[in-house]
Image: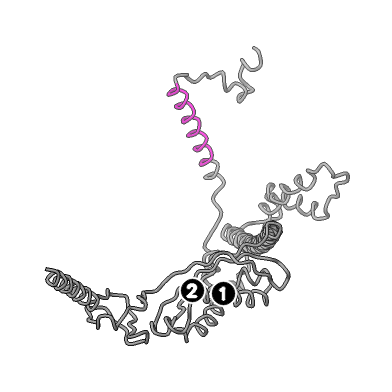
Amino acid sequence: MSENTILLAFLAILALLVVVGIAKSVIQVHQGFTVIIERLGKYNKTLRPGLHFLIPFLDSVRQRIDMREQVVPFPPQPVITSDNIVVNIDTVIYYQVTQPEAATYEIADPMSAIEQLAVTTLRNIIGSMDMEQALTGRDQINGQLRGVLDEATGRWGIRVSRVELKAIDPPATVQSAMEQQMKAERDRRAAILTAEGVKQSAILTAEGEKQSAILRAEGAAQSAILEAQGESRAILQVFDAIHRGNADPKLLSYEYLKILPQIADSQSSKLWIVPTELTAALDAVTKGFTGRGGDEPVTVNFEGLDEDIADSLASTSLQDVDEALASARGEATRASSEAEESGTHSGKPFDPRAELGQHPDMPEQRGE
């Protein structure tokens, strides 16, 4: 019985070893990962995604590596600028393993190495810049830092794809000074813009006044021209009317006498000088109304005039005096009729006493 027991125990141990060996000989690698295999402590091969078989107890898994891109944020690091200002910079690094064998055997702790390299490189870059350059030159800092890290990690089988400065925090006193500087800069720009606006407004106002003055001058010139043309046409029409009416000395003398009161009608007139032509004018009036001295007919010289004007002037004459008086009386009668008719339509009949002042010879006016 003891031998059977020993045999059963041996078979059980052998079966257990077979099961363990089979379990160790089969390995499954997921997508995005690689597995480093060592045989008897020495690198043997790298397993890609899929199902693989190993030699039990000879082959062993050294490391399972994630081949996807990784994002590692580093804690804020104090950095001194060239103008001796301490700033805290947060950094974020994007990296990816490209050679799993080098990442396993070339560097013991790649993350710690990348962090220390990023801190030292960042201090070198920021140390050559002042505070303003560090705040405004993020792209430049990112590019330089990524270049240095990618060059150093290339032999480790790691590729640094991006480096981003998440935050640059200067001291509180520096932030306050920067805010005051920015406020002063904004005030300066606002003052400049206001001055530019005032300048443009003044220029536009001056330009508008210039255009207005030009337009007023042009309007005055046009007005003077039109007035001169009107006076010229009026003179020509008067000249035409005089020649068409065949004016005689009686009419001219009468018009001359009508102008004399206008000459004397002025508050500033202290002395009225009688022209020497007054005697001749009175003589002409006397001759005209008495019928003496008007033996020779009045003639008009049409030489130098246009033929059409000369013909029209020669064929015209003044209206007869009796006809003019009859026409005036007819107009007065028509006006009186219209006034009486208007009073009748308005509901108030015309009162003949309203025109007593127009008839001084009536008995009612004299009080009889």
How far apart, in angstroms, are the residues tagged by discs 2 and 1?
A: 9 Å
- The quadrant of the image that shows the C terminus is top right
Vertical comparison of 84 with 286: above or below = below
Looking at the rendered structure, the kind of residue marked 1 is Gln
The secondary structure type at the circle numbered 1 is helix
Residue holding disc 2? 111
Question: On the image, which quarter does residue 58 sit in?
Answer: bottom left
Q: Position of residue 152 (x, y in %)?
A: 52, 84
Residue 140 within the segment the image draws in magenta: no
At horizontal 31% and vertical 75% (from top left) the residue drawn is 32
Q: Position of residue 106 (x, y in %)?
A: 46, 84
Residue at the (47%, 24%) spot, across then down: 343
Farthest residue, direction front: 1
The residue at which mark 1 appears reads as 116
Query: Which stretch is magenta?
Result: 326-346
What type is the residue that disc 2 sits on? Met
Q: Nearer the viewer, residue 56 or 281?
A: 56
